Amino acid sequence: MIRLLLLVGAMLASQGLQAAEPPIFQMSFQDAEPGKVPNGLLVLDGGFVVRAEGDARFLELPGAPLETYGVLFGPAQTNDVAVTARIFGTGSGRRFPAFAVGLGGVNGYKLRVSPGKKQLELIKGDSVLQSVPFAWESGRWTHLRLQIRQAGAASRVEGKAWGDGGDEPAQWLISYDESEAPRPGRASIWGAPYAGTPIRFDDLEVRPAAAGS
């Protein structure tokens, strides 16, 4: 058996295949206690707590007040790191939530879904660096992935979003070249319940960034 495993490993190495690197940080809420915030999360503001619905558990931001709230998690990182999360929200009439994942701490980069604008936006601080059209669906989980990786002397910031049950886009929907070196900071999730309805978060993950062109 040992010889067989060594042979398989050698074959994979000869084909340039490597096992995926383990996550730097990973948290789902299936085993978390409802009504509390699990260890490892730093709530910046807002009434985030774990909620249960049937067999599912998730981190929930209440639908009021109508401000922007965030949570930091994972270790401080700079380049070559990616954050992923699933986020659920619902619209109410002509009002819609906005939500994001982030890297580089409070004032770092954020990949934000803005249903009111029908856009996916890359933000740094308070400035929108890039945006693309995005068709968000109310009442459906949305996956967000944001990464920063070294690209020569600069950094490349890339992001994508897709609906639960759909295929992850093969290409990044947003790609932005940054000449300034990124500051170290923790990953984050953000929610703005402008619709007055709760926003849910699940499957938080920080990993080494994926290679790209």
Image (cartoon, grey):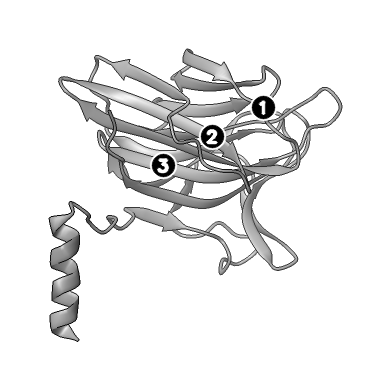
Q: Residue at x 47, y 14 (%)?
A: 130
Tag in front: 3 or 1: 1
What amino acid is labelled 1 in the image? Ala
Relative to 126, does residue 80 appear above or below in the rendering?
below
Residue 90 on image: x %, y % = 76, 38
Decide: few, some or many residues near mark 1? Use Cα within 10 Å; few <14, some 14-19, many ≥20.
some
What amino acid is labelled 2 in the image? Ala
The first of marks 3 and 1 along the sequence is 3
The first of marks 2 and 1 along the sequence is 1
What amino acid is labelled 3 in the image? Val
The residue indicated by pointer 1 is 135
The residue indicated by pointer 3 is 83
Q: Residue at x 44, y 19 (%)?
A: 125
Q: Residue furthest right?
A: 93
Relative to 46, does residue 2 appear above or below in the rendering?
below
Decide which of 28, 75 is in the foreground and name it.
Answer: 28
Q: CA distance from mark 2 to mark 3?
A: 12 Å
Relative to 110, does residue 81 appear above or below in the rendering?
below
Query: In this image, 112 relative to 140: left or right?
Result: left
Quadrant where the image shows the N terminus: bottom left
Q: CA distance from mark 3 to mark 1?
A: 21 Å
Q: Is residue 38 visible?
A: yes
Residue 73 on image: x %, y % = 42, 47
Is there a contact, CB below 8 Å, between mark 2 and mark 1? Answer: no
Query: In this image, 18 relative to 203: left or right?
Result: left
